[in-house]
Every structure is written in structure tokens, then in C-alpha cells.
Image (tube, rainbow, N blue to C red):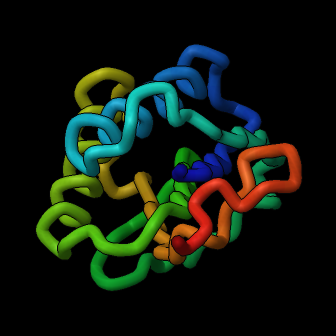
Amino acid sequence: MPLVRIDIGSGSSPELRQAVSDVVYDAMISVANVPRHDKFQIVTVHAAEELIYPPEGYLGIDYTSGIIFIQVVWNAGRSTDVKKAFYRRIADDLHAMAGVRKQDVWISLVDVSPENWSFGNGVMQYAPK
């Protein structure tokens, strides 16, 4: 049930965009226990001036124009430890597989209740019983 939004700079290659997609999907399955084939993602490529971040850094983290914003909307209920492991897996794997700086992997999780989804046909598939 996750919906993933990936916002990335226009200087990124199609291979990098695919790697980000794959890494996030793999982390969802292996760390966050998301069902296989539950892959709904929107990848948006932006001009450099459309990705805004503090050039002086934030919380001791410095960013570059290679910043990648990842937002995952998913069902609430995962523990803090699972979320920490999810963040770490994505940053580690993007660094190892694609050379992305870990500092440039910016992730936001949005927890929602299951009835907030319709996967088509105008139906609330996870309606309360």
C-alpha cells in the first residue's frame, strides 16, 4: 500500500533513477514487510532550482545538488526501529550501488490508516470491517 514519491535532479541519469526506485522498493519489502508487487512510485525529475535545500546545511548535514527527496506514504503501525532500519538501508544501498552521498538521501515517512487508500474501481479495499 505504500505510495513513493521520488524527486530528483535533472542531472541524474535514468540508471540512477531506476536504482533509487529499486532500492526503495527492496527496503520496503525486506525491512518494512510490504507485500511483494505493492510497488506504486512516482519519479519526478526537477531542474536544479526546483529542489530547495539549505545551502548551509541542517542538523549538521551538508547537502549538494545531488539531493534526492523520497517520501513514502504507508499504513501506520511500524515501529521506530523498523523506520530507522528503513532509512539506513536506503542510504547505505544508494551509496553502495550508485555512489549517492548518504547526506543527500532525504526521506520522509507519512503514516496513514488503511481506509485512506483506494487502489481502483472507486473502492476502499481496506475498509474497516
Number of numbered discs on residues: 0
Furthest residue toward right: 122
| Residue 62 location (% of width, % of height) | 38, 67
When the figure is inspected, residue 93 is found, relative to residue 113, above or below; the finding is: above
| Residue 116 location (% of width, % of height) | 66, 71
Q: Residue at x 55, y 63 (%)?
A: 73
When the figure is inspected, residue 40 is found, relative to residue 110, above or below; the finding is: above
| Residue 92 location (% of width, % of height) | 22, 40
Q: Residue at x 63, y 39 (%)?
A: 40
Q: Nearer the viewer, residue 27 or 91?
A: 27
Furthest residue toward bottom: 59
When the figure is inspected, residue 101 is found, relative to residue 39, above or below; the finding is: below
Q: Residue at x 53, y 54 (%)?
A: 70
Furthest residue toward left: 81
Q: Nearer the viewer, residue 87 or 95?
A: 87
Based on the displayed image, in which of its 4 quarters is residue 30 positioned? Answer: top left
Q: Is residue 7 left or right of residue 63?
A: right
Q: Residue at x 32, y 84 (%)?
A: 59
| Residue 120 location (% of width, % of height) | 81, 44
Furthest residue toward top: 15
Q: Is residue 104 left or right of residue 78?
A: right
Q: Nearer the viewer, residue 12 or 110?
A: 110
Q: Nearer the viewer, residue 35 or 111?
A: 35
